[in-house]
Amino acid sequence: MQFDLSSVETATLVFIGTLVFGLVLAAFVLAAGLVALVLLGAGKLSWTVVSRTLLAVVHGINAGWDRLVHHAAALDAGGDFQGQTAPSTGTYPRVILRDS
Protein backbone atom coordinates (compact mmCIF):
# COMPACT_ATOMS: atom_id res chain seq x y z
CA MET A 1 0.00 0.00 0.00
CA GLN A 2 1.43 3.34 -1.07
CA PHE A 3 1.07 6.36 1.24
CA ASP A 4 -0.37 9.32 -0.59
CA LEU A 5 0.15 12.80 0.93
CA SER A 6 -2.63 14.23 -1.20
CA SER A 7 -5.12 12.32 0.92
CA VAL A 8 -3.97 14.11 4.13
CA GLU A 9 -5.90 17.22 5.03
CA THR A 10 -4.23 20.60 4.87
CA ALA A 11 -4.76 21.23 8.59
CA THR A 12 -2.93 18.01 9.43
CA LEU A 13 -0.01 19.00 7.18
CA VAL A 14 0.14 22.46 8.79
CA PHE A 15 0.10 20.86 12.24
CA ILE A 16 2.91 18.43 11.36
CA GLY A 17 4.92 21.26 9.74
CA THR A 18 4.46 23.38 12.85
CA LEU A 19 5.72 20.51 15.04
CA VAL A 20 8.77 20.00 12.82
CA PHE A 21 9.49 23.74 12.82
CA GLY A 22 9.16 23.78 16.63
CA LEU A 23 11.56 20.86 16.97
CA VAL A 24 14.11 22.59 14.73
CA LEU A 25 13.73 25.79 16.74
CA ALA A 26 14.07 23.91 20.05
CA ALA A 27 17.20 22.14 18.78
CA PHE A 28 18.69 25.50 17.77
CA VAL A 29 17.94 27.04 21.19
CA LEU A 30 19.42 24.02 22.99
CA ALA A 31 22.57 24.15 20.85
CA ALA A 32 22.93 27.91 21.45
CA GLY A 33 22.50 27.36 25.19
CA LEU A 34 25.14 24.65 25.19
CA VAL A 35 27.58 26.89 23.31
CA ALA A 36 26.88 29.73 25.77
CA LEU A 37 27.54 27.44 28.75
CA VAL A 38 30.80 26.22 27.21
CA LEU A 39 31.96 29.79 26.56
CA LEU A 40 30.95 30.85 30.07
CA GLY A 41 32.84 27.92 31.56
CA ALA A 42 35.94 28.69 29.51
CA GLY A 43 35.78 32.35 30.54
CA LYS A 44 35.41 31.47 34.20
CA LEU A 45 38.27 28.99 33.98
CA SER A 46 40.57 31.54 32.35
CA TRP A 47 39.58 34.22 34.90
CA THR A 48 40.25 31.81 37.76
CA VAL A 49 43.66 30.89 36.37
CA VAL A 50 44.63 34.55 35.82
CA SER A 51 43.41 35.73 39.23
CA ARG A 52 45.10 32.88 41.11
CA THR A 53 48.33 33.48 39.20
CA LEU A 54 48.28 37.18 40.09
CA LEU A 55 47.52 36.39 43.72
CA ALA A 56 50.41 33.91 43.80
CA VAL A 57 52.76 36.52 42.33
CA VAL A 58 51.68 39.13 44.88
CA HIS A 59 52.02 36.60 47.70
CA GLY A 60 55.50 35.68 46.48
CA ILE A 61 56.55 39.34 46.34
CA ASN A 62 55.20 39.94 49.85
CA ALA A 63 56.92 36.84 51.23
CA GLY A 64 60.22 37.82 49.59
CA TRP A 65 60.00 41.36 50.93
CA ASP A 66 59.17 40.06 54.41
CA ARG A 67 62.16 37.70 54.28
CA LEU A 68 64.42 40.54 53.12
CA VAL A 69 63.25 42.88 55.87
CA HIS A 70 63.70 40.24 58.56
CA HIS A 71 67.16 39.38 57.23
CA ALA A 72 68.15 43.05 57.20
CA ALA A 73 66.78 43.53 60.73
CA ALA A 74 68.88 40.59 61.96
CA LEU A 75 72.08 42.28 60.85
CA ASP A 76 73.70 44.63 63.33
CA ALA A 77 73.99 47.88 61.47
CA GLY A 78 74.32 50.03 64.56
CA GLY A 79 77.27 52.34 64.64
CA ASP A 80 78.37 55.90 64.33
CA PHE A 81 79.50 57.75 61.30
CA GLN A 82 82.48 60.00 61.53
CA GLY A 83 81.56 63.35 62.91
CA GLN A 84 80.82 65.92 60.23
CA THR A 85 80.12 69.54 60.57
CA ALA A 86 77.07 70.53 58.64
CA PRO A 87 74.80 73.53 59.00
CA SER A 88 71.72 71.42 59.70
CA THR A 89 73.22 69.01 62.26
CA GLY A 90 75.77 71.16 63.99
CA THR A 91 78.73 69.14 65.26
CA TYR A 92 76.81 66.07 66.42
CA PRO A 93 77.81 62.78 64.79
CA ARG A 94 75.22 61.07 62.64
CA VAL A 95 73.86 57.82 63.99
CA ILE A 96 72.53 54.92 61.92
CA LEU A 97 68.98 54.25 63.01
CA ARG A 98 67.38 50.82 62.93
CA ASP A 99 63.96 50.13 61.47
CA SER A 100 61.55 50.92 64.27
Image: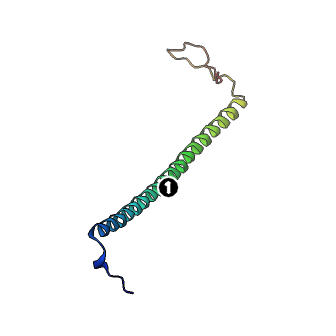
Q: Is residue 77 left or right of residue 17?
A: right
Q: Is residue 37 above or below residue 94?
A: below
Q: Is residue 79 left or right of residue 21?
A: right
Question: Residue drawn at (65%, 33%), measured in percent from left and top?
Answer: 69
The quarter of the picture where the C terminus appears is top right
Q: How many marks?
A: 1
- Picture coordinates of residue 70, whole percent (x, y): 69, 32
- Picture coordinates of residue 95, whole percent (x, y): 63, 20
- Picture coordinates of residue 38, whole percent (x, y): 48, 57
Q: Nearer the viewer, residue 45 or 55?
A: 45
Question: Residue drawn at (56%, 48%), measured in percent from left and top?
Answer: 53
Q: Nearer the viewer, residue 64 or 56?
A: 56
Q: Is disc 1 surrounded by few (<14), some (14 to 19) or many (20+) residues within 10 Å? A: few
The way the protein has been coloured in the rendering is: rainbow
Question: Residue drawn at (32%, 81%), measured in percent from left and top?
Answer: 4
Which residue lies most toward the bottom here?
A: 1
Residue 96: name its quadrant.
top right
- Picture coordinates of residue 98, whole percent (x, y): 65, 23
Q: Is residue 9 above or below residue 82?
A: below
Residue 1: name its quadrant.
bottom left
**Three-letter code for the amino acid on which mark 1 is drawn:** Ala
Residue assigned mark 1 = 42
Q: Nearer the viewer, residue 97 or 3?
A: 3
Element on which disc 1 rests? helix
Question: Residue drawn at (39%, 64%), measured in percent from left and top?
Answer: 23
Residue 33: name its quadrant.
bottom left
